[in-house]
Amino acid sequence: MPASVHVERTFSEVNGWESVYTYKGQYADIVTASTNSAYVGNATRVNVRQEDGGYGVLEVTFASIDNTIVDTPSIEPETDVWTFAPYEVQRNAWEHPYFATLQFVADPGHVSKIVAAADSYQNKVRGDMEAGTRVGTAFKVEAYMYGSNADSNSETGTDGLPLGVYSTAIQNKTTELANMLAQGRETYNEDKYTLRNTRIVPANTLLKASTYRKGYQWTTNRVVDLILTQKVEATKYSICGELLLDFAGTYWLKKAPTITELYNGKFEIASEFINHEAGELPTEFYPYHA
């Protein structure tokens, strides 16, 4: 973007006080800035001039009202843009719904045993290699879950139950997850969604309003309410419809906003909401805003 700026303030009987911001830089950047509300929002005049060597000059004039901080606080944004975008997070392999059948009451901690079994096998391989011993034992999850490492039954004094007493689905998923972990494939990428709200507000805006309920899990309905209480445009109804249709019953974690002071005394406020399934985050740390 334009690299240099010069500010000149003048007074006239006709126009009162005016501030003229002059930017210089590559002509292509000047043209881009001339349509960017961060540079020209609420300007009374905008002038673009091309100079030799591929350079250009942007002159932006603001009337006195845009450079005066009034005493009455305001929360009305000058621009209000919502961006709905995907992003990826990395999760543990055993958290994938594909392995949901391994979360069963008959064997508490079953998944933890699988993870520990894979870790034990990897430790054995490392120990053999460090000792110069050939690694010749194939990995069998039963040997680590129900062998010498098996749970002990305090009543009978016997080892834990063998894997074969459980259903075929549990046996297959247990073996599949264990082999995956033993091979070092411990994570997967999950697509999630984020809502980002960017607003440019006057200098007299109450900035505290932007931090309201940060760290809370907002219901989809509360997020829709927030969108519709700000400047309403036709595109916002499309976003709200998408949220209510495909994200009902989910929650949106509000992150701390980024507040940036702009060149003309205004502020850019960027707030982000990250989508999570119900129960995905502990409510002790991230309470609901319903």
Image: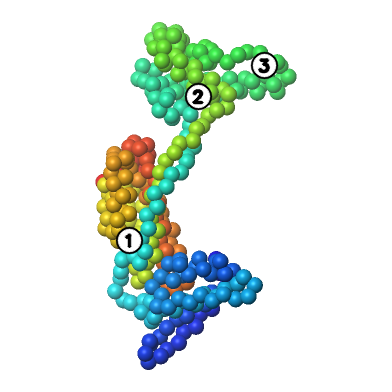
Image location (x, y in percent) of residue 203: 38, 71
Instruction: Give the vertical position of 198 relative to 151 (above or below).
Output: below
Instruction: Name the residue that disc number 2 marks.
Output: 115
Instruction: Name the residue that disc number 1 marks.
Output: 209
Element assignment for label 3: loop
Instruction: Name the residue that disc number 3 marks.
Output: 135
In this rendering, position of residue 24 left or right of residue 47? right
State the residue at coordinates (56%, 22%).
Answer: 182
Which residue type carries mark 1? Ala
Element assignment for label 2: helix
Colour scheme: rainbow
Q: How crowded is mark 1: few (under 14 residues within 10 Å), some or many (20 or more)?
A: few
Image location (x, y in percent) of residue 82: 37, 54
Which residue type carries mark 2? Val
Instruction: Give the vertical position of 5 relative to 143 (above or below).
Output: below
In this rendering, position of residue 135 left or right of residue 252? right
**Residue 5 in view here:** no
Q: How far apart are marks 2 and 3 (CA)?
A: 21 Å
